[in-house]
Amino acid sequence: MKKYSEPNFRSSALISIDTQRDTLDGQPFEIPGTSAALPNMKMVLDAYRDQRMPIVHIVRIYKKDGSNVDLCRKEAVENGMQMLLEGSPGCELASEIFQRPIQLDFDLLLSGKVQEISSHGVVMYKPRWGAFYNTPLDSHLSKLGVDTLVFIGCNFPNCPRTSIYEASERDFKIALVEDAISGLYPKGKEEMWNIGVQVTNARAAKKAVFT
């Protein structure tokens, strides 16, 4: 069943979902397991950086007035909950996954444009769960000519899972790095296998990038 779905890491882009400071241990929007996964996220990111292969960091940014917040969190943000707020330190990408500090350009990202952070790495803002929804991701990947997407990041049940289904709808080959993502559960792994996603680990993904 792998004839058409087997990932090709050498023609892939790495997609990092919502790995932001507010989601780490002890922070306002703590997602259990995200801090623990950071070393494995960095392992895979470093492999892509070393090979100068494309990386896309997808982030969520909430405006302080709540005007762009999804409905299930809108009231909380309007009432003053501090999570992933525009311009706040907690909205920045987790420093642990980088070799040097990165600062987001919130105005640029909220305008729907791509922020370049290296010759092969970019950041994009997504307004909802899926990384393809009202974002420039599809056109960006088309320009890169990749056929495979490798996913790491934060909170599998929500944004990564949605983004993976969106990628599958667009006929990308897909790999999910199970020890470089938080919130993955057994049934979720089964769901991924059932749609042709290769569930792998950070060391195997690193090796595949160099092969």
Image (cartoon, grey):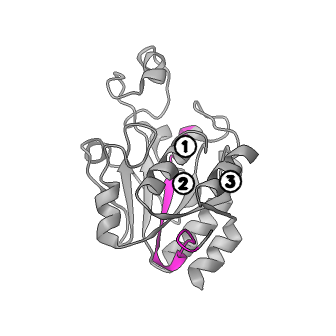
Q: Which residue is mark 1?
A: 21
Q: CA distance from mark 1 to mark 3?
A: 13 Å
Q: Residue at x 29, y 55 (%)?
A: 114
Residue type, mark 1 in image: Arg
Residue furthest out toward the front: 1
Residues packed near mark 2 inside 10 Å, few (<14), some (14 to 19) or many (20 plus): some
Image spot of residue 143 (x, y percent) = 29, 69
Q: In the image, which is nearer the foreground, mark 1 or mark 3?
A: 3
Magenta stretch encompasses residue 7: yes
Between 90 and 62, the one nearer to me in the picture? 62
Bounds of the magenta segment: 3-22
Residue type, mark 2 in image: Ser
Mark 2 in CB contact with mark 1 (< 8 angstroms): yes
* Residue 26 versus residue 66 in the image, above or below: below
135 left or right of 39 in image: left
Q: Which residue is mark 3?
A: 37
The tag on residue 95 is: 2
| Quadrant position of the N terminus in the picture | bottom right
Q: Tag 3 or tag 1, which sits nearer the N-term?
A: 1
Q: Tag 1 or tag 2, which sits nearer the N-term?
A: 1
* Residue 94 versus residue 204 in the image, above or below: above
Q: Quadrant of residue 28?
A: top right
195 left or right of 77 in image: right
Image spot of residue 151 (x, y percent) = 55, 58
129 left or right of 6 in image: left
